[in-house]
Amino acid sequence: MAAATGYDYIIVGAGSAGCVLANRLTEDEGATVLLLEAGGSDRHPYIQVPLGVGQIRKHSLFDWGYVTEPEPHLNGRRIPLLRGKVLGGSSSINMMVYTRGHRGDYDRWARNGANGWAYADLLPYFRRAETWEDGEDSWRGGSGPLTTTWAGTTDPVFDAFREAAVEAGWPEVRDMNGGDGEGIGMVQRTVGKGHRASSSVTYLRPALKRSGLTLRTRALVTGLTMRGTRATGVEYTQGGIAHRAEAKREVILCGGVFNSPQVLMLAGIGPSEHLGELGIATLSDLPVGKNLSDHLYVHLNWARRGAGPFRRQMRIDRTVVDMARAWLFRTGPATRLPADLMAFFKTRPDLEAPDFELIFRAAPLLAQLWFPGWRAAYQDEYGIFPTLLHPLSRGDVTLRSTDPTDPVRVRANFLSEPQDIQTLRQAFRHARDIGNRKALDPYRGAELAPGPEVGTDAEIDAWIRNIVVTVLHPSGTCKMGSGPDTVLDPELKVRGIEGPARRRCLDLPGPALGAYQRGRHGGGGTRVRPDPGPHAPGAVERLTRGQGAAFPWASIYASRRFRRRRFFSTSGGPSKRSAPSSARRPPRGPISSASPRASSPPIPPGWRFCPAAATWRSPSIRSFSSTRSISPAPISTTSRRPAARARSSPWSA
């Protein structure tokens, strides 16, 4: 093993959270940071050009290769669980959808013990993290590092989708990330100047110019070095050579909803019974790996009369030109995806937050290149995807062995709770109702999936169990809160680990309405994402919306950590961007009293303006004295793809 080297901070995982933390920590010119990532570079055109995400999903590129164990409630199916193994983590392979989630989800987390995580506490940091295309207001940011834009798709079928939903009695919302997130509205994406705005692009690349940051790619973390209950460093392999690094201040784990539990359990932090089965001495008996949840969805598809603009775009000669144009000049059709609408609705009016989502698509899931004489053009179709937002079913993540190169065992236990399939069935019926409305008559052909023969509750449930998949917003395996069933306290300290070199990671207590970047997933971080993954989901991996979603969470946490330093003192005013060019974009200007956002006060009561931060701050926000990671970036390991794995949809979140 090579001689140990020392740093102030060691960050395991250069994904959604890790990239943000590397940026924030190295703002301190005296700090030294080692950032370890199991994957490689994110410079590939498929990553940078938005349209390339279809090929990433189709061929499982830049992916850890996880799949669940045979799922007992899904007829023994094994469900693929894509997680980004590349700089930027899952923010480099997700669908680039930007959805903060509903305020009710965050307020529920705070009530359940995650103090400081209510929506009012987080809104200033959401605003500070982004540069919104339409400029700054009381809900949106105008000078942050993360560029957020309207999806900008021009297919007229989306107007028909919107009219059909309104005809069915559902509300519209102008800005999903504004005052009210319930209703049908336009998708927003993390795309800047025509390229993907991943955490690697927006946070890591600027930080790499600083002398205090050392980046090691294709570095597999094999363990933590512990002194009693103190984490003092890590061991990792790179290029077949074993290395050891010591942390003078902190080891920060940003490994994601699957890899973070693995590192913790290998170090003796986890369920004592499970660790004892593998001969691992328990340092802290915690429910690491428990509480796994994720968003699930099914897809209803109809044949489309005539060819939509995306099918014309998929002719191979046009696609090649469009990809080159987007890669070189950052313009053209390849900078957009055929999904422009989403909706968050409630199955019951008394619910605090929406419990299902509808995703609207104007192209088949498996759209492929075509050319006359080479391959016939595919039959065009469109779809609506009902999505379960608040699953009650819980799974777990456990070790297969003490070998750090062995993938963890994932038992998701999807649809084990009867309420989950009931809610998804209701969402299915609402989606079918919208799809059969008059506004879609000019576009609608035959129902392809599931088909008109599926109609009773039993038939719908059977179809759901045969085809349901995850939106890739896993979360919850290092649950945060204040009860005995949590791994982290609200300040992201691992319970039972003492001393200045504490292991920190973030996993929100449950899935949120939508995962960041839906992750659309987080993720997770774990949607903590983040990426609580489901985002929202995810442990910082969604929340890290998984997904598992979601690196604005990492930005929020880094901002909270350093708000008394110069990181929080950068001033910035409203964006001077030009008005949106898309004719389909919602009109700008004053918001009428009837609009959803007008129902909420422009500035939350009790907040005060902070000139140094150029934003509004809640009096309940506290400064924390130690670093925390908020989005799970996958931690290192070798290829985890089983010999035989199911193929996931290239368009799932």
Image (spheres, rainbow, N blue to C red):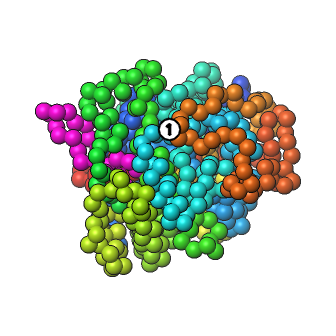
* Residue 434 at least partly seen: yes
For this rendering, which residue is in front, 85 or 288?
A: 85
Q: Where is residue 349 in the image (x, y as percent from the top left)?
A: 61, 73
Q: Where is residue 512 in the image (x, y as percent from the top left)?
A: 58, 59
For this rendering, which residue is in front, 84 or 310?
A: 310
Residue lying at 35% horizontally and 68% vertically, measured from the top left = 464
**Left or right, 236 with reference to 319:** right
Instruction: Check the picture and name the quadrant holding the N terminus.
Output: top left
**Left or right, 127 with reference to 90:** right
Residue lying at 65% horizontally and 28% vertically, measured from the top left = 577
Question: Dividing the picture into quarters, in which one does residue 78 lie?
Answer: bottom left
Question: Dividing the picture into quarters, in which one does residue 45 lie?
Answer: top left
Residue lying at 56% horizontally and 40% vertically, measured from the top left = 585
For this rendering, which residue is in front, 538 or 224?
A: 538
Q: Residues in magenta?
A: 361-384
Q: Position of residue 331 (x, y in %)?
A: 46, 25
Count of marks, rendered view: 1
| Residue 427 vertical position relative to residue 440 in the rendered view, above or below | below
Within the magenta stretch, is there residue 378? yes
Q: Position of residue 265 (x, y in %)?
A: 50, 57
| Residue 529 vertical position relative to residue 388 in the rendered view, above or below | above
| Residue 110 vertical position relative to residue 329 in the rendered view, above or below | below
Write down the residue under mark 1. 152
* Residue 542 at least partly seen: no
Residue lying at 61% horizontally and 54% vertically, measured from the top left = 173
Q: Main secondary structure of the magenta part?
A: loop
- Callout 1: helix, strand or loop? loop
Within the magenta stretch, is there residue 360? no
